[in-house]
Image (spheres, grey):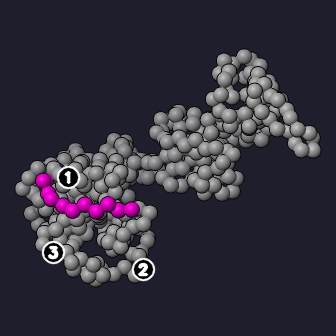
Amino acid sequence: MANDKVVLLDFWASAFGMRARIALAEKGVQYEYKEENLLDKSDLLLKSNPIHKKIPVLLHNGKPICESLNIVLYIDETWSDKYPLMPQDPYDRAQARFWADYVDKKRASSLPIGTSFDSLSQAYLLLMGDEIILLGCGFSPFGMRVRVTLAEKGIQYKYREENLDHKSPLLLASNPVHQKIPVLIHNGKPISESLIIVQYIDETWRGTSPLMPKDPYSRASAMFWAEFIDKKEEVVVLDFWPCAFGMRVRIALEEKGVQYEFKESNPFDKSDLLLKSNPVHKKIPVLIHNGQSICESLNIVLYIDETWNDKSPLMPQDPNDRANARFWADYVDKNLRAAKIVKRWEKKSRPWTSGLAERSPLLLKMLPVEDKTALGWKIKMSGSASSGNKIKEL
């Protein structure tokens, strides 16, 4: 590999880039270093890593490899003739990948206090022979990934269903870091995280049905895309369909091409998720992005525009124009009611207003009496001023 062209796109202060540089130095690989300006990313970086658009990126004979842990594994597999970076034993390799991934995700976090690895071995004294146990949950796609892998290899195993609301001591002992399924236990040794488990199975039972390609670059690409799928963003909108403020959020997401899950929220019987996500105002809409909640429709739109900033900008670039846009959006929020908008549409004979009462009784409750009358709904008023009016739909 003397004629190989190796280029590293990096930023000198990056700890993840340092990981790649140490691996290359350990292997004695000559490479060209290209410093990246993270505030003005080069066309080469954007082309080489179009998914995350970040450093480090290793270019090997023109082929890009992204994500620092993925790069280190690629370096170890490609220049395998000296100084191995990963252990040879499949279980040890799986553990090394697990903890490297854990460091990437947690960084400054420390190991859980009180974690005892001696207790792990004691928990499996009763396990004898070449025994394989899978801790999973029936509907989990990550557990399904492992079950398919085991079936593909023709491996016999014992399956234990886990109750995620009441996790078993075995699960908690086997995966004390994340405390989640799936976990594969092979002769008393636990392996966690579905992608790492699949790699472990493929390396341990090599005799049949290889799951990963032999070419190091192809393996790196396969691992990259598998991890990308695992980390796919979760976007949820808590909303009520006639809400004009929620419509603002939905339009912004559609404009950006963001896939999201819509959860209908009853404004008169608010869900625990809504109350937890918006404890201050306790109202819709709420955007939940990877578990983090963003409230207030204008704030949500600005968040969407700043988070998915690669296409269809919603706000102007000029600071003065942006300030004016925020001012008028805030003015609309404070001075117009959704009921007035609905009433105005009825006066213009908009066809969508017909049958609204049948489509959503909740909308009937939301609007004042005069607005319901304007929409053509028959309202019967009963009761006195002292006892209060009761609204009934005929």
Disc 1 element: helix
Instruction: Count neighbours of disc 3 (C-alpha within 10 A) and say few if under 14, some if 14 to 19, many if 20 or more.
Output: few
Q: Residue at x 61, y 51 (%)?
A: 271
Looking at the image, residue 279 lies above or below residue 63: below
Q: Is residue 288 left or right of residue 285?
A: left
Looking at the image, residue 368 lies above or below residue 119: above
Disc 2 element: loop
Question: According to the image, label 1 marks what residue?
Answer: 149
Taking depth in this image into account, of 77 and 114 the one nearest to the observer is 114
Looking at the image, residue 298 lies above or below residue 111: above
Q: CA distance from mark 3 to mark 2?
A: 30 Å
Residue 329 location in percent, x, y? 70, 38
Q: CA distance from mark 2 to mark 1?
A: 34 Å
Residue 156 location in percent, x, y? 15, 59
Q: Residue at x 37, y 79 (%)?
A: 115
Picture disc at residue 115: none
Question: According to the image, label 2 marks what residue?
Answer: 113
Q: Is residue 3 magenta?
A: no
Say which amino acid is labelled 1: Thr
Instruction: Count neighbours of disc 2 (C-alpha within 10 A) and say few if under 14, some if 14 to 19, many if 20 or more.
Output: few
Disc 3 element: loop
Say which amino acid is labelled 2: Ile
Q: Is residue 268 left or right of residue 161?
A: right
Question: According to the image, label 3 marks what residue?
Answer: 128
Say which amino acid is labelled 3: Met
- Which stretch is magenta? 153-163
Between circles 2 and 1, the one closer to the viewer is 1
Instruction: Examine the rendering and report whether any part of residue 8 can be seen.
Output: no
Q: CA distance from mark 1 to mark 3?
A: 23 Å
Residue 84 location in percent, x, y? 15, 67
